[in-house]
Image: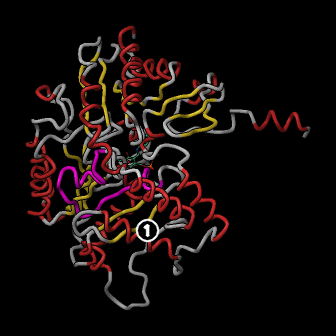
């Protein structure tokens, strides 16, 4: 192969099957990122693109942060990999201890994964195995929620409630049921922050307990605030009520905090924000600032303790990944936590939240805006879909924003924003001025 041919092959877009992407549309008109710094991506055409979504809800400290870059460089030269099973390295233990100290309640034990999807599978397996270890092997049923997103592996897809993510993949995991979602209650439209109405929707868990008998239910998994389905907030009192019902029936409550953990709501975790403590919390994304794939599952001491039975030479939990707690990811996460701490990022969202909220709700009277939702540094801008062409209006807004130098995310006909937590007021102004301009003229 000549150098020219090799170069052409390297630049060929055909071989790569892109995830969650309209491949043919993209390849006809690619949008290529070649660099990033702070709040901005650098595009292959030389333009800057303001990152309105922290990569994909993961670069909470912004891009190219020196602490993280240094930590990774140093780690690569010192210890590239350590076997994950029956061997350890100091940074795993340091990171787990530090994370456990950050978590509220008894969520003191930490299991490492490489993604949100893996964190979810880990949590679901822990829940079922926990009950079995305590002699309640009849508790195998898993309860998710309509419109929930818990990643793309079989367990997470099954407890998830996004029809497009499920329909192609057969009968999924059996023994799963779903709570009703909390979206679209007429009386909650244009709520600032947490909506007032809908705590009663948590009573749906009682309905499922009546139907299946609570003794068959291992766990309920919900996102405290659902991101992927279009920024759906929990009504006031809803999560508290879920916690109560789970306690009443001996069911574990899992919070999937893959997007809410590490400062997104202006508190370290959503559990802090809502003051509701789950039995298990799944995280990933911003744990290592999106720089290296990493996830962490937090469990209450009682869960870990239930596994620590039997002969001490036996593996207690037959689960784990080759890259669980790998040195590079741990180094990146430690550098990330240093950065969060030094810049006060885990609570910065609360300082900016009211400015952000005003900016979101300034869009209220624009054409096709049917709801606005905000919490911490998250916004959902729901547009009226074009009849017969769902998702088109929001995706057109995405393309126009890209042309104007702003990266947004759309799901269905909702625009979602979740910027790096280093965002300044001037960036917020730019983002909402840009979106306002677009919405004024969008078809
Ligand atoms: N749980 C939740 C709550 C998530 O939001 C996952 C699990 C899966 O994580 P991984 O790391 O396996 O992708 C997620 C992922 C979006 C968007 O724009 C959201 C996610 C991923 C990509 C885009 O809404 N969430």
Residue at x-position 9% and y-position 48% = 203
Q: Is residue 417 left or right of residue 74?
A: left
Residue 329 point in image, percent of width and height: 53, 61
Residue 11 point in image, percent of width and height: 74, 34
The C terminus, quarter of image: top left
Q: Report whether residue 116 is seen.
A: no
Per the image, is 266 magenta? Answer: yes
Residue 368 versus residue 405: which sits nearer the camera?
Answer: 405
Residue 331 point in image, percent of width and height: 53, 63
- Residue bounds of the magenta highlight: 265-288
Task: Say few, some or many: other residues with alpha carbon within 10 Å of mark 1 (under 14 / 14 to 19 / 20 or more).
Answer: some
Q: Quadrant of ligand 1?
A: top left
Residue at x-position 15% and y-position 40% = 235
Q: Report whether residue 324 is seen.
A: yes
Q: Is residue 40 left or right of residue 44?
A: left
Q: Residue under label 1, please give it.
A: 95
What colouring method underlies this structural image? secondary structure
């Amino acid at each position: 192969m000549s150098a020219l041919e090799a170069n052409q092959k390297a630049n060929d877009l055909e071989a790569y099957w892109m995830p969650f992407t309209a491949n043919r549309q993209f390849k006809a008109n690619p949008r290529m990122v070649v660099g990033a710094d702070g709040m901005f991506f650098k595009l292959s055409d030389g333009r800057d693109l303001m990152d309105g979504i922290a990569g994909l809800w993961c670069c909470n400290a912004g891009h190219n942060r020196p602490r993280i870059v240094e930590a990774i460089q140093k780690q690569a030269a010192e210890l590239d990999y350590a076997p994950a099973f029956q061997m350890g390295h100091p940074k795993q233990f340091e990171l787990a201890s530090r994370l456990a100290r950050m978590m509220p309640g008894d969520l003191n034990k930490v299991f490492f994964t490489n993604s949100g999807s893996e964190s979810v599978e880990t949590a679901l397996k822990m829940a079922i195995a926990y009950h079995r270890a305590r002699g309640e092997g009849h508790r195998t049923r898993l309860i998710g929620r309509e419109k929930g997103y818990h990643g793309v592996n079989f367990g997470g897809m099954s407890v998830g409630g996004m029809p497009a993510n499920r329909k192609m993949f057969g009968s999924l995991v059996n023994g799963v049921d779903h709570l009703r979602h909390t979206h679209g209650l007429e009386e909650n439209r244009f709520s600032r922050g947490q909506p007032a109405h809908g705590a009663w929707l948590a009573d749906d868990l009682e309905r499922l307990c009546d139907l299946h008998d609570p003794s068959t239910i291992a766990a309920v998994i919900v996102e405290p605030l659902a991101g992927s389905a279009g920024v759906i907030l929990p009504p006031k009192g809803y999560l508290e009520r879920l916690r109560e019902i789970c306690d009443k029936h001996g069911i574990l409550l899992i919070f999937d905090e893959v997007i809410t953990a590490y400062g997104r709501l202006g508190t370290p975790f959503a559990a802090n924000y809502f003051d509701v403590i789950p039995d298990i919390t799944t995280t990933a994304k911003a744990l290592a600032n999106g720089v290296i794939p990493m996830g962490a599952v937090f469990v209450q001491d009682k869960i870990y303790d239930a596994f620590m039975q039997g002969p001490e030479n036996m593996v207690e939990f037959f689960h784990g990944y080759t890259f669980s707690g790998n040195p590079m990811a741990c180094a990146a996460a430690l550098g990330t936590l240093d950065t969060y701490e030094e810049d006060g990022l885990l609570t910065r969202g609360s300082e900016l939240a009211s400015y952000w909220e005003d900016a979101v709700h300034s869009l209220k009277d624009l054409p096709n805006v049917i709801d606005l939702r905000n919490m911490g540094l998250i916004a959902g801008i729901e547009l009226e879909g074009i009849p017969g062409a769902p998702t088109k209006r929001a995706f057109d807004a995405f393309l126009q924003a890209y042309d104007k130098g702003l990266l947004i995310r759309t799901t269905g006909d909702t625009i979602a924003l979740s910027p790096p937590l280093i965002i300044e007021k001037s960036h917020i102004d730019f983002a909402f001025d840009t979106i306002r301009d677009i919405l004024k003229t969008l078809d």
